[in-house]
Image (cartoon, helix red, strand yellow):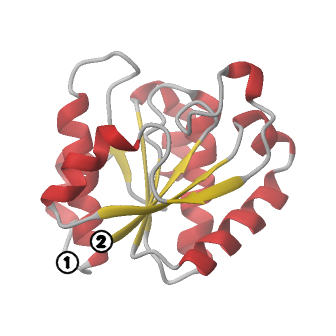
Amino acid sequence: MKVLMIFDQIQAGMGGKEKANIAPGGKKGEIGSVPMIKPHLKEVDGQVSACLYCGDEYFKENKEEVERKMVGMVKKLNPDIVICGPAYNYKGYGKMCAVLADKINENTSIPALAAMSEENEDTIAEYKDKMNIVKMPKKGGTGLKNSLANIALLAEKMYKKEDTKELKKDICY
């Protein structure tokens, strides 16, 4: 299973809040925080084939451009599944994850999911009925290992077009 990850500038390893205006980009292979989820993806025969990134402030100021570019890059890279996040408790990143996963699901045949913590309550309330948003702890919270395993498991089931109803009751908002 070829996985494409979508990160903000921090999770991509491109800098902190001072780099929030970084334009969309991408790289084949692994960048940033991929090593955290890599062992969990391996358990479901998945590997990261590419990563896309965008600063959350750039996204906020150029939403339609970023949506168009990200959907286009996803189509070009043609992964089996797209994982947007994990966004933890970062509100700008959480919003970007939900919006991009929703746009990818709307405009491609490639399934996409998002992952974030409950601190993103407004985004969760707006998008939880439109797409899969995996529950996770806030940055530094307990339960990260379990949530990363849940992301990988849901990604596998979505890719294989298996029934996810019961699993989502436990791991999604």
Q: In which quarter of the image is residue 86?
A: top left
Q: Which of the 4 quarters of the picture holds residue 116? A: top left
Q: Is residue 122 visible?
A: yes
Q: Which of 79 and 138 is in front in this view?
A: 79
Q: Determine which residue is flagged by label 2.
A: 158
* Rendered location of residue 89, percent (x, y): 48, 25
Quick one: SS at disc 2? helix
Q: Quadrant of the C terminus?
A: top left
* Kind of residue at disc 2: Met
* Residues marked 1 and 2 touching at CB (< 8 Å): yes
Residue 117 on image: x %, y %: 40, 30
Residue 98 vs 144, above or below: the answer is: below
Q: In the rendered view, would you say 127 is above or below 86? A: below
Q: To which quarter of the image does residue 79 belong?
A: bottom left
Q: Quadrant of the N terminus?
A: bottom left
Q: Is residue 39 left or right of residue 13?
A: left
Residue at the image position 23 percent from the left and 19 percent from the top: 142
Q: Check residue 162 in the rendering and tell me which mark sits there, or answer none.
A: 1
Above or below, comparing residue 11 to residue 166 in the picture: above
User: What number of labels is visible?
Assistant: 2
Compared across the picture, whether 92 is left or right of 51 comes to right
For the residues labelled 1 and 2, the Cα–Cα distance comes to 6 Å
Q: Residues within 10 Å of mark 2 (few under 14, many from 20)?
A: some
Give 98 or 156, whichever is nearer the viewer.
156
> Is residue 58 or residue 137 the one in the foreground?
58
The kind of residue on which mark 1 rests is Glu
Tell me the SS state at disc 1. loop
Q: Residue 139 carries which label?
A: none
